[in-house]
Image: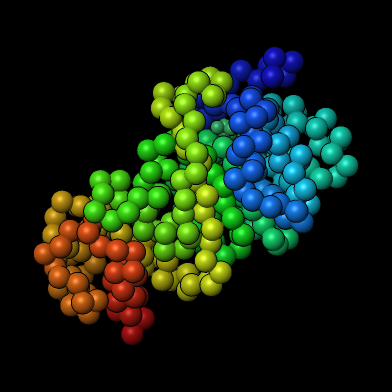
Amino acid sequence: MAAASLAPRKSLGQHFLLDEAICRRIAAQAGDLAGRHVIEVGPGPGGLTRALLATPAASVVAVEFDSRAVALLAPLAEASAGRLRVIEGDALGLDLATLVPAPRHIIANLPYNVATPLLVGWLRDAAAFERLTLMFQQEVAERIAAAPDTSAYGRLSVLAQWRCRVQLVMSLPPGAFRPPPKVWSAVVVLDPKPEAPDPALFRALERTTAAAFGQRRKMLRGSLKSLGDAEGLLAGAGIDGSRRAETLTVEEFERLALGVLRRVTP
Ligand code: SAM
């Protein structure tokens, strides 16, 4: 890092993992990678990348925004006998599934400032991936894995759990990173359900959860008004309008989203 003048940049969410044992533990959470194609977002100086190359993965494609890190990783790519390809680019603007053939994994210590939009984008196309093994801020990881009737349960829990089986598998203290972030971090493993739903239904679920959790203290008959006939929607889904968003299961949100979709496309 010193040789490449890779002073960490806060604006790029750069908190690096330099401990080999921790990188190996994260890679191990992905399960058996033999014959799998791995996409890593934000390799930085390449600690996790090296751990991924040490697995039997068929290939690793790493997408990095920072040209300094891309240059730093060039010798590693050269020494990898074609197993590592580093792409300079913004992962937010890329369709990751087009970069490698199936079976695909995404494994990353994500830049925290764009972690949520990255995850929501991948959930839209979740069936393209066998597993996602992702490091988030602990609080975001808890929201992704939260159960109904808890304060962490929200839009992200519903979207993630509708498309994937979700497990929070390990937490790391700030001191594991250089420089240390202010908060703890956690790895979430997401196993997508194999069926790919209608993209319009995912959009309807996004709209429904945004309305419901946008005013989470309100009863649903109030918070869902922005979707149109809230009472009709709730009756159609068999849900009592005096309930609040955080009491609904993922399956109940799906029923509401189906109602929203039917009204758009009768
Ligand atoms: N994987 C490395 C590690 O664990 O040491 C670095 C992780 S650091 C939390 C996040 C990385 O994502 C940084 O290298 C940063 O430059 C990169 N990054 C930030 N925004 C990005 C984006 N939009 N697309 C691709 N990479 C990005």
Most extreme residue toward the left, as rendered? Answer: 242
Q: How is the image coloured?
A: rainbow
> Which quadrant of the structure image shows residue 40?
top right
Most extreme residue toward the top, as rendered? Answer: 2
Q: Number of labelled discs?
A: 0
Image-based side of 14 in relation to 206, left or right: right
Identify the residue at image location x=29%, y=69%: 252
80 in relation to 237, above or below:
above
Residue 177 placed where, x, y %? 54, 24
161 in relation to 5, above or below:
below
Q: Quadrant of ligand 1?
A: top right
Image-based side of 174 in relation to 42, left or right: left
Residue 211 placed where, x, y %? 25, 58
Residue 153 placed where, x, y %? 30, 51
Q: Nearer the viewer, residue 116 or 132?
A: 132
Image-based side of 36 in relation to 136, left or right: right
Residue 24 placed where, x, y %? 66, 36
* Quadrant containing the C terminus in the rendered view: bottom left
Image-based side of 79 in relation to 72, left or right: right
70 in relation to 40, above or below:
above
Identify the residue at image location x=48%, y=60%: 164
* Quadrant containing the N terminus in the rendered view: top right
> Which quadrant of the structure image shows residue 207?
bottom left
Identify the residue at image location x=61%, y=59%: 129
Is residue 69 among the parts visible in the rendering? yes
Identify the residue at image location x=29%, y=63%: 249
227 in relation to 109, above or below:
below
> Which quadrant of the structure image shows residue 147?
bottom left
Is residue 65 among the parts visible in the rendering? no
